[in-house]
Structure formats: C-alpha cells, structure tokens
C-alpha cells in the first residue's frame, strides 16, 4: 500500500496557505495547518475533516525559533499513527510597505529584520529542523512560497523583496546540495495573487490615492505579466505538482492570466 504523506503548511489558516492545505488534503495527505491565528487554522482543519480528510491545527510563529522543538515534537506525536512530516510547505509570509530609506525604522521597528525573520529565517529554520530526517529516510519534499518579489524589485517593499530574494537564493543553492538525496526543494514565485494580502495592499492604495477599490484592483492585476491576478487555487495546484514530482531546484513563476490563457502561458518554469 502506498504510504500516506504528512504535510506541514505554514500560514495555512487563510489565503494561499489555506488553498494549499485543502489541496494537499484532497490529494490524500494528512495536513498540519500552522499559523498564529488558531481559530482560522481550526476552520481549515474542520473543512478538511468534514471532507473526509485528516488534519490538525498547529500554533506556530515562524519567527519564534525557540518554540520549534516543542511544536514539532507535538506534531510528531499527533501524526505518529500516520508517519513523519515528509511534505513541508513554507508559505507563511508578511509584506509591509514603506519607502526604502524608512524601512529600517518604520514605527520604531526594523522592517528589514522583521521580514527576514518571517520570510527567510523562519523557512530556513524549519528546513533545518525537518530536512535531516527526510534525508535519513531518503524522501522529502519542500516547497517554498517566495514571490515575483524574489525575482525582481518593486517600489516601497524593499524589505519584502530582500527577504524573498534571500529565500530564492537559499532554496536554489540548497536544492543543488540535495540532489540525489531523495529530498527536493522547489519554489513558487507568484505575481500578485487574489488573496487577503493583496486585498490589504488594495485597501492601502484606496486610502492613499482615493481611487476606487475596482481601480486599485485593476492596477494590481495590470502589474502581472498575464494581465490578471493569480488565483489561490492556481498556486495550490502548482505546489501540489511540485510535492508530487521529482523535480528539484525549480522556480515556478506564476504570471496570471489563467482565465483567458492556457496554463503553459501562466507558469514560467526556470
Ligand atoms: N498575495 C500575493 O500577492 C502574493 C504574491 C506572491 C507571493 N505571496 C506569498 O504567499 C504567501 C502567502 O500569502 P497570502 O497572500 O496568502 O498572505 P495572507 O493572506 O496575509 O496570509 C499569510 C499567512 O501567513 C501567516 N503568518 C504570517 N506571519 C506568520 C508568522 N510569524 N508565523 C506563522 N504564520 C504567519 C498568517 O497567519 P497568522 O497571521 O495568523 O500567523 C497567514 O495564515 C506569503 O509568503 C506571501 O509572501 C503572496
């Protein structure tokens, strides 16, 4: 009988992470839905369990490295009847905006450090905690959700871009070292996605520029090379494709345009 996978999806309580958790569960994996907001994680878990799947909520602050040992020990215990975590999806992320010269002291905190802690060191530390076991067992899949902001710059989000570039450089390097271990590491780099994070950006534009919500939304969609926002499900589908293949060191750049274009034109593989 084929072994059942156990997935850990960070930032699984809403947005892209929720779509990934639901997709992994539909593919038969038992899923840890991890984030800080436990009510959101529980809702996703309930949705999975109601659909006949297996899932657990997990309280995890990816920037609080000191809690990793305890949280992962709890996860191991919960999933002991199924197996070890063999799919890791580093999806949790934050994006704050400010002029680049003010990022270092916005609201009294260093936004560069904050973004690096959540968007880069969090995934890196989780990888350090889970990948050695995967290597030992000769099987594991890691997908890191970076961003087109890991491939190019955008105005007013220098800290976000720096942290995503760090994640891309780290992941493509680590993938080379993982070759032939049975463990793979890949990246998805979506352009603007129709998710709560983008909704918050749209809201900021509306407040700052007095544009209508529809105009602001069209502005973000027009930034995407495909001309429309990427959907959460599209990201989840690509993540699942990477979790279930032997591809290693790949970057899937999701450019948008799914409603009108064939999939090959909405995903650029690097
Ligand atoms: N939206 C886009 O346009 C877009 C484009 C490219 C890439 N991405 C990337 O895709 C990922 C998901 O984005 P999204 O649009 O779904 O964002 P979102 O709607 O804001 O969701 C972010 C998720 O990350 C979690 N999170 C944030 N800080 C965390 C922390 N310290 N520890 C644990 N979990 C944390 C949040 O839960 P809690 O706050 O409850 O912890 C939430 O579940 C991010 O890495 C983002 O950078 C997004």
Image (spheres, grey):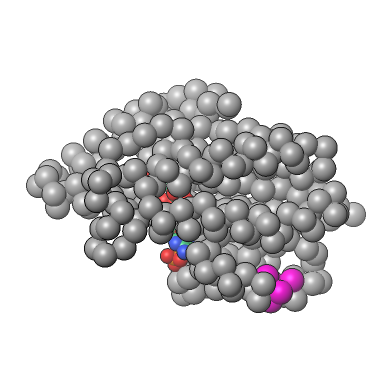
Is residue 60 visible in the rendered structure shown here? yes
- Image quadrant in which you'd find residue 161: top left
Q: Position of residue 219 (x, y in %)?
A: 24, 35
- What predominant SS class does the magenta segment belong to? helix
Q: Position of residue 34 (x, y in %)?
A: 56, 66
- Image quadrant in which you'd find residue 26: bottom right
Note whether 267 is above or below 18 in the view shown.
above
Q: Relative to residue 104, is residue 87 drawn left or right?
A: right
Which image quarter holds the N terminus?
A: bottom right
| Residue occupying the point 38% across, 52% down | 112
Q: How many marks do you count on the picture?
A: 0
| Residue occupying the point 56% across, 33% down | 252
Q: Relative to residue 211, is residue 204 drawn left or right?
A: right
| Residue occupying the point 76% across, 50% down | 140
Note whether 214 is above or below 250 in the view shown.
below
Note whether 100 is above or below 130 in the view shown.
above
| Residue occupying the point 58% across, 26% down | 270
Is 75 magenta? The answer is yes
Note whether 246 is above or below 137 in the view shown.
above
Is 253 magenta? The answer is no
Q: Position of residue 111 (x, y in %)?
A: 35, 56
Q: Position of residue 24 (x, y in %)?
A: 64, 53
In magenta, the rendered stretch is 72-76
Q: Quadrant of ligand 1?
A: bottom left
Q: Looking at the image, which residue sits at the far left?
A: 210
Q: Relative to residue 160, is residue 129 drawn left or right?
A: right
């Amino acid at each position: 009988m084929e072994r059942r996978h156990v997935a850990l999806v960070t930032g699984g309580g809403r947005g892209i992470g929720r779509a990934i958790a639901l997709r992994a569960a539909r593919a038969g994996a038992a899923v840890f839905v991890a984030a800080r907001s436990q009510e959101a994680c529980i809702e996703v878990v309930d949705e999975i369990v109601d659909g006949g799947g297996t899932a657990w909520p997990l309280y995890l602050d990816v920037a609080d490295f000191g809690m990793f040992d305890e949280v992962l020990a709890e996860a191991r215990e919960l999933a002991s009847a199924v197996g070890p975590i063999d799919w890791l999806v580093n999806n949790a992320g934050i994006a704050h905006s400010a002029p680049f010269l003010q990022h270092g002291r916005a609201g009294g905190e260093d936004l560069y450090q904050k973004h690096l802690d959540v968007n880069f060191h969090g995934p890196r530390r989780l990888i350090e905690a889970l990948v050695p076991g995967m290597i030992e067992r000769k099987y594991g899949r890691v997908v890191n959700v970076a961003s087109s902001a890991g491939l190019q710059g955008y105005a007013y989000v220098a800290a976000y871009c720096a942290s995503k570039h760090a994640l891309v450089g780290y992941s493509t390097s680590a993938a080379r070292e993982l070759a032939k271990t049975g463990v793979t590491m890949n990246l998805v780099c979506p352009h603007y996605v129709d998710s709560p994070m983008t909704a918050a950006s749209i809201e900021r534009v509306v407040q700052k520029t007095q544009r209508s919500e529809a105009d602001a939304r069209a502005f973000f969609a027009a930034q995407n090379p495909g001309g429309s926002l990427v959907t959460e499900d599209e990201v989840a589908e690509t993540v699942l494709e990477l979790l279930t293949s032997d591809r290693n060191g790949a970057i899937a750049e999701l450019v948008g345009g799914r409603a009108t274009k064939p999939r090959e034109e909405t995903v650029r593989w690097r």
